[in-house]
Amino acid sequence: MEETQSSEQRKLEIARYPFHQQAPWILRTLFAVQHLLVQAALLQIVHCLLIDALPTNQRARQHGYQFMATSLFSSGICTLLQTTVGSRLPLVQAPSFEYLIPAVILISHPMETNASHHNDTDLVVPCPGTQCPETEFSLQTWKSALSEVRGAVTVSGILQVLLGFSGIQGVVTQHSGPMVLAPMLSIIGLSCYKEAAQFSSLHWGVTALFILLVVLLSQHLRSCSIPILRWRKSEGIDVLTRLPIFRIFSLLLPIVSLWILCGNLREGAAMNPYPGGGFQGILGTNSTDLVPWFRVPLPGQWGAPTINVRSLYLGTIMALGASVSSLGCYMMCAKVTGSLHPPRDSCNRGICLEGVGSCIGAVLGGISGTSSSIPNVGALALTQVQTRHSVQIAAVLCVLVGMSAKLTYFLTTIPMAIHGGVLSITYTMAVSVGVSYFQYTNIDSGRNIFIIGFTMFMALLTPRWFSHNSEYIATGITSLDLFLLALLLTPVIHGGFLAFLLDNTVSGCPGGSPQVSPRFRRQHSMPTTS
């Protein structure tokens, strides 16, 4: 009887695939492809928003494949470092929205140029078409803007390396209890609802069908297992194991199915990822014939990053936002995989290597930094496939695809409505994990109720108001104005700072009622407080 129970338990563990266990090679490869497709959603959305924010983006869009290929290449290198010598959690590295907000602000406010270059005789006339020629002045404008963004990414990477080496990230992690993690993870999940709705609205039917398939496979059919048969000459056919195919591939199957369906049913612009009036994005060019099949990203191929006062200020905001997001991502990944929270040294190594990855990407010509990918951790929670080896294989695939801009173009043929659905599904897992931390707190405490409500409301209210009233930030110093605007428009920084400040400064309830359960302190090695 005990042997039968242990055999069934072993089969269940194999079907779940925890991060310390190896799956068969074919399954690991499919898991890696699933991670790559989820990562491609975040990668393409970030690059589309960045390129569309450029004042003159026609020529930049023609090089969009190369920018994405460079980001994939650097993300693969950073993922290998992170899973090998960093935090050693199954974390995929990818561009994030914490880099996007300061980068868009930097691009939207280009540096002033010498007007005497034109002798006040040439007027810049906007051209709405896609075949309009670009002047040398407009060409230098977007190149200098992206060079300044790379400078800000380089500054953020250096600051993250300093955070890791100094041990500050580990100290902050040690003093981040459930009252910090719960609102912070909830805000991380809610902070991208505008982008998810924006890209889902390109075709609500595709997005709704994608979400319906994911819910059906991951929830309703999660217990349905497919028998894997084995034939031996002496024993005949027997059942080797049973795999919950629908659950472990609940993202891969809908993405591939709708990708093929949209490709076959596309009539004119009906199923185009960039319909008329929407985002032009990276597919708005027919210059892919000029892109080589194989090209290794080289340092300085797009020029050296520009580091000035503006890039220094906004690089600081990038570092703060990415550090807060990565802290939440580490804790979310540990919660999802059922392991203890990573120790201080692991968090320090992780944030340090994220900074190294951002610097590598900026030097190679990438226009966004790298941090731990929330959507991929959400995929871990959804599929319950947490093997680290599949993440490392996904990193190798990122490096290989990043060496070919044409293979990157193949990924960009996925309709943006599917990417919007991927964000809608995976970021909800961050909200749910954040809510799950409430079980470790005394939720009836007035102190805790205030911290949760005030933190979440203000972190969503302040960026919303300043996004429509940015003219109120006028100190007379342009660089300082951009710094304050980027700081006030980043909800993750607000949520993390307010939750950490209030939880560590507001005293507890009278009578010594504990604010954090002893079970949380035992499992997560928090310092004991009186």
Image: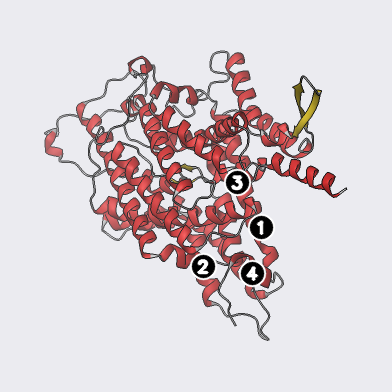
Residue 124 image-quadrant placement: top left
Q: Residue at x 32, y 16 (%)?
A: 290
Q: Residue 522 carries which label?
A: 4
Name above or below for residue 183 compared with residue 359: below
Look at the numbered discs 4 and 1 and tell me whether their residues touch, using CB distance below 8 Å. Answer: no
Separation of disc 1 and disc 3 at Cα? 23 Å
Q: Residue 174 carries which label?
A: 2
Is residue 174 visible to us here?
yes
Q: Earlier in the sequence, mark 2 or mark 1?
A: 2
Q: Position of residue 443 (x, y in %)?
A: 70, 69
- Disc 4 secondary structure class: helix
Marker count (numbered): 4
Q: Which tag is nearer the camera, tag 2 or tag 4?
A: 4
Mark 2 residue type:
Gln
User: Foreground: 488 or 3?
Assistant: 3
Q: Mark 3 points at which residue?
A: 19
Q: Mark 1 points at which residue?
A: 435
